Image (spheres, rainbow, N blue to C red):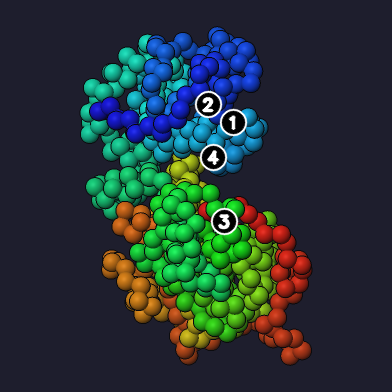
Amino acid sequence: MAPTPLRPSSPKPRPKNDKPGNRRHDGAPSRNPGQNRRAEQRNDVPRPARERDPDDKSPFLSPGLAIDAERLLEEVLRFDGAADVTVSRHFRDRPAYGHRVRGLIAEAIYTALRRRAEFSHYAASGVGRFERRLLLLALRENGVSLDGLATEGELAWFKHLATIPRDTLPAPVRANLPDWLYERLAARFGEAGALELAAALDTAAPLDLRVNRLESDRDTVMAQLAKAGPQYAPRPTPFAPDGIRLAGKPDLARLPLFEYGVIEVQDEGSQLLAQLLAPRRGEMVVDFCAGAGGKTLALGALMRGTGRLYAFDVSDKRLAKAKQRIAKSKLQNVQLVTLANENDLRVKRLAGKIDRVLVDAPCSGLGTLRRNPDLKWRQSPESVAEMNEKQRSILASAARLVKPGGRLVYATCSLLTEENEAIADAFLAAHPEFERLDAYELLRAQRIELPAGASPYLQLLPQVHGTDGFFAAAFERKADAAPKKPAARADVDDTAIAPDAADPASTPAAPADDTPAAD
Ligand SMILES: C[S@@+](CC[C@H](N)C(=O)[O-])C[C@H]1O[C@@H](n2cnc3c(N)ncnc32)[C@H](O)[C@@H]1O
């Protein structure tokens, strides 16, 4: 492996009494230097080979903090839960950590997750604990200085690594994917394609926003963001008409545009899925797997808040989050419904009455590895097979809602054929009352020009479109094909569903959530 060049430093003036043992966790001099010294003099803190050069401006972690980061990495690598939850809890328990330290540690953990296969390969040699070796590799990759941190033995190990040519590593290791996943992606995209895709999935996703059409338009918001400060550096997303891409990751929580629901955080790919469903004013629309409401908000805005938009999900917790975001977005036409399962009676009552149905199905999430790199290590062929059952069942049930001439979109954020084309093809084969639509044509009709795909199904890829990986299949119920319908009772308005406790129309709006959502 060629040694990774260090990234440019982030210079900071150095206080006079600034010695490693005197540092607070955010890098400032400690109010209690003795405490830090004691921590760093413990037997388990390796002795660094050399002191930091006082003029070295590159980012650094003290030996004590490196030990703590190593413990966090060990916990994350047990994969007992989502990495972002584990990392957030770790920092919540350490309120003394400043912004700089949190950033360095979090980035190191995410780098170690992204490059786990490659780093584990290198860590097979070397000295010290395995997690420490992974951590040092991640810190070095992120441009963190190893002076004042790495031991003699570790520096010698780095020298040895520099002699290993990267292209001699097995392909799944270079791709940083588990073997089963690499094999599936290579079968689909070829070896070079899989490596290119894997490399794109190993980069950090940009921060994309969607402008709420009920409140403003893209040009106005871009001008406001540009005026709000150089940290936003907004530019239009290449494809989605309401999308804005920011250059960095500025904090949005206190930005009035965000606080008042004028903008939402949403990957451009998610925005394109809403465009593909293309709901119109006054229509009846169902977002079958609404979750925390990311796509519900986009659909509601396209409908200009008119018509009726049902947000279904089996998770109360997720719909409660959706409720907060809906209140903030000022949408008045959304009805939240917690389903017992996809065959809930309330789904049956709407059979054949809905103009457009989005099924944003539960999936492996492997298209979102830029944000959730732990997923590639947490999913397995078995978990995907389990998901397939659910996907088939949800799609079949949701299809019953669609009225003749109405549109059905099945979408995932997966890259696997078995969660995507296989589900869509099997659905079409079993439902001759539906026909497949060309997703690219549907977008083109809205002047959204995507490079043509290999099939009428939409496939978004990070290395091609700059979005997360998404799949979508669009279907239309043939005009003469009425759905099978349970016997209707004449005394009920069967488009009216008993509202849930979470329905914004039936309960006072909750205070707006000020945490940007990732979808
Ligand atoms: C990919 S997520 C949806 C994300 C959401 N559409 C968004 O844009 O924020 C899939 C959702 O499907 C929901 N789900 C799982 N099983 C379901 C079922 N049987 N019926 C409806 N929703 C289900 C999950 O709770 C989860 O919120």
| Residue at the disc numbered 2 | 27
Where disc 4 sits, the SS reads helix
Labels 1 and 3: the sequence-earlier one: 1
Labels 4 and 2: the sequence-earlier one: 2
Kindly report the distance in space between the C-alpha atoms of the residues bearing marks 1 and 4.
19 Å
Labels 2 and 3: the sequence-earlier one: 2
Labels 1 and 2: the sequence-earlier one: 2
Where disc 1 sits, the SS reads loop
> Residue 97 has which mark?
1
- Percent coordinates x, y for residue 9 in the rendering: 38, 32
Identified at 64% across, 65% down, the residue is: 328
224 relative to 277, above or below: above
Q: Amino acid at mark 4?
A: Ala
Res 203 → quadrant:
top left
Identified at 34% across, 59% down, the residue is: 465
> Residue 377 has which mark?
none
Identified at 73% across, 90% down, the residue is: 490
- Percent coordinates x, y for residue 230 in the rendering: 43, 52
Q: Quadrant of ligand 1?
A: bottom right
